[in-house]
Amino acid sequence: MKEQCNKILVVDDEVKIVEAVKAYLENSRYQVFTAYDGEEALNQFETVNPDLVVLDLMLPKISGEELCQKIRKQSRIPIIMLTAKVQIDDKINGFNIGADDYMTKPFSPRELVVRVQGLLRRCSDGISPLFNIMSWNNGNLEIDVAEMIVKKFGKEVNLTPTEFKILSSMIKYPKKVFTREELIEIALGIDYDGFDRTIDSHIKNLRSKIEDDSSNPTYIITVRGTGYKFGGEDIKQ
């Protein structure tokens, strides 16, 4: 059985802080990615698809506040903010823009690890999409995540559990390119021992149900040599 490892993105312009946090997290068996400014962090976020972000507020290029807001526009992954600001108004503002937890500098890396563990436990059933009911392309496709209902042009579409797992996972991270291996783990479990091309059959069936033209897909886009990504537009609540 393959061991799963949560991916943590640590963002701070102070090298010593990043190195200390990285060491403690890796010692707790997390896979750690780092960035030292907001622009690099945004690129890492979109590429790595982390499970949690540790984010400093005072960053070059793109501020921590702005970066937090950008992340919140596309994901609900947990965010722990780090800052030297100690005023209660600063903390309230951090929560208002989307932080899940808040630590003031100087802080204990050991305590940070505990907070990371706690947030990930609370999210262990998977990251929720931004809204329970989401629609794309002027209502052409609608998904009620809570009720597991998919509608095409207002009519319910019957997806298999595997197809729904694939689709709901992809809409949580609309910019992420999923490899076949990742989609297999999501849909079939990490113990699956079949061919990775099995996922292509599920993708083909899913496209036949939700696309206007499955040979020219709008939603499930092939990224040659890598896998698939979600391509719908105009997300609405």
Image (cartoon, rainbow, N blue to C red):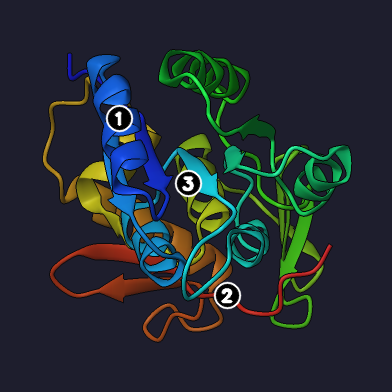
Taking depth in this image into account, of 182 and 130 the one nearest to the observer is: 130
Residue 191, horizontal then vertical, whole percent: 22, 20
Query: What residue is disc 2 on?
Result: 232
Name which of mark 2 and mark 3 comes first in the sequence: 3
Report the amino acid beneath label 1. Ala
Name which of mark 2 and mark 1 comes first in the sequence: 1
Taking depth in this image into account, of 147 and 182 the one nearest to the observer is: 182
The residue drawn where x is 26% and y is 37% is 19
Taking depth in this image into account, of 146 and 202 the one nearest to the observer is: 146
Q: What element carries label 3?
A: helix
Report the amino acid beneath label 3. Glu
Residue 194, horizontal then vertical, whole percent: 13, 33
The residue drawn where x is 30% and y is 40% is 16
Report the amino acid beneath label 2. Gly
Query: What residue is disc 1 on?
Result: 20
Residue 56, horizontal then vertical, whole percent: 53, 49
Q: Is mark 1 on a helix, strand or loop?
A: helix
Asked whether the residues under the numbered discs 2 and 1 touch, taking CB atoms below 8 Å apart as contact, a structural biologist would say no
Please identify the quarter of the rendering in which residue 143 is found: bottom right
- Give the side of residue 36 with respect to residue 171, left or right: left
Taking depth in this image into account, of 166 and 156 the one nearest to the observer is: 166
Query: What residue is disc 3 on?
Result: 163
The residue drawn where x is 56% and y is 34% is 105
Q: Is residue 209 above or below residue 192?
A: below
